[in-house]
Amino acid sequence: MLKDITLGQYFPGNSPIHRLDPRTKLILLVVYIVILFVASGPVSYCLCLGFLAACIAVSKIPPKSFLRGMKPLIFLMCFTGIMNLFFTGGETLLVKFWIIHIYLEGVIRAVYMILRFIALICATFLLTYTTSPIALTDALESLLRPLGKLGLPVHELAMMMCIALRFIPTLLEETDKIMSAQKARGADFETGSLIQRVKALIPILVPLFISAFRRADELATAMECRCYQGGEGRTKMKQLRYGRLDASAFAVTLAVLAGSIALTVFGL
Amino acid sequence: MTPLLEVQNLSHTYSAGTPFAHKALEDVSFRVDRGEFIGVIGHTGSGKSTLMQHLNGLLKPDQGRVLLDGKDIWSDKKFTRECRFRVGLVFQYPEYQLFEETVYADIAFGPKNMGLDGKEIDRRVREAAGFVGITDAQLNASPFDLSGGQKRRAAIAGIVAMEPELLILDEPTAGLDPRGREEILDNIQTYRRAKNATVMMVTHSMNDVARLADRLIVMSQSHLVLEGTPEEIFSDPQSLVDMGLDVPEVTRVFLALEKRGLRLPRVYTLDQAVAALAALKGGARHA
């Protein structure tokens, strides 16, 4: 039941997108977000969405998984859309009812905002679907390394992130087990008022925290026993290297960026 | 007479409809009569724990039925909940479910969920604590201050306090030292005698089931493959070994002695072995 939750789930594969250096993907995601915010006309929006669709097609990730991932954000999208619909002023009045004024500009803006939202979410999902969490932390560590000069413990932060990601499935499994055990003692999580339901969580949370602390303690001991020392002087088994594929990915994305800027300048 | 519990053609598949689907149980049927002590043995991953979670309605069968007292436990929602109390399930490593501030409150969690009044809860908690040998001083302590074996016993008391008609224990002695194991098994026996309760115990210890169980159920690769008294089950050591199981240690010793030419009866427990050896010794002297 709890295992069905997708938390930036990684779909293993061997598509060109999968094979890109994780740093490339991370940087290009940022570039893509810039492209999205540069775009302003119908043609430039088509370019943005088309580019994203092409990337998704190349990655061979089933489009359904993107829809599934978007579900929890539907409310936010609708909210953004409605806010833009009602509160954008303009010249062409479409509907006038009591204090509600809907202008054509508002409709267009709402559609653009929702499209931008969808593209943003899909692009982020494309990154997490095609990149394993470990690769992602590696990339982050590598990209943030310059900040290490300012005294930021980059390696330690990346390690913490890595461990946190690693333990999500373990803790979910543990939660499942504890829930079953408490249900066997008649605990009821499904009925009752809100306060009762919150109270019903105590028998799950207490054992869960205790086991999480125990695991953390054991892991720390195990790391100490192996004389783990992060940061300085530590080498990696898998070195990140930019390749030809990354160069072409950069070229294509920058071309889309240039195109988007050009289209916006011409007002398309 | 209707059996206490009857399982009919039970099948269960995890993650059905996804690429990760795997069959955990296939066409399992058996019955449990009142007052029996049933041992459930099987290799790791044979489906024992999944089977146990079906017996009190934690998992819903894909196919087949589980009848408690002749009534399908999924027939209505209220009855499913009632089954949780009538069939008490002690999970593996149950000490990880302790959460209350005192041992007393933790044991009282189950009875409280049953909606019993304070006096009855108090009686049950004290009685259950008595069965597992938890002292009054320990009842008021935090469960996290107890030793490993004591924690385990406190957790078992939490189920026993619901006074289930059928008590199921999933590897209750896993990870304990020999003394802790003996204590738990003694507690179960005490409880069983006092309440004339029906008990099912999943275990990897052939020695324990040979000594305690009236009947054995053997699971292998999602199927129930053998069912019978310990004598019947352990009479064919080779097929058990093929399933990744074994016969009790004394049985193995006696089989080895037999191979060396001694004429011995089949034994399954230490007591039987002592008696058989005494008889042999006596017979040899008289000859």
Image: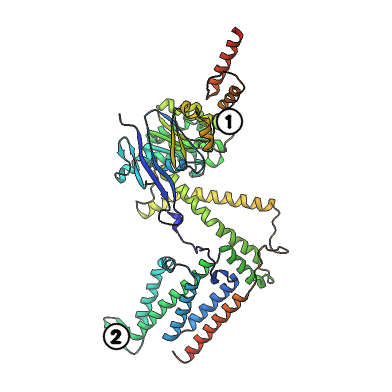
Residue beneath disc 1: B179
Residue beneath disc 2: A94
- Residue A117 position within the rendered picture, expressed as x and y whole percent measured from the top left: 44, 75
Looking at this view, is A96 or A14 the one in front?
A: A14
- Amino acid type, residue under disc 2 in the picture: Leu
Residue A50 visible? The answer is: yes
| Quadrant of the frame with the N terminus of chain A | bottom left
Residue B106 tag number: none
Q: Residue at x 42, y 25 (%)?
A: B194
Residue A41 visible? The answer is: no
- Residue A35 position within the rendered picture, expressed as x and y whole percent measured from the top left: 51, 81
Looking at this view, is B260 or B12 the one in front?
A: B260
Instruction: Name the secondary structure under disc 2.
Output: strand
The subunit carrying tag 2 is A
Give the total number of marks visible in the rendering.
2
Looking at this view, is B205 or A142 the one in front?
A: B205
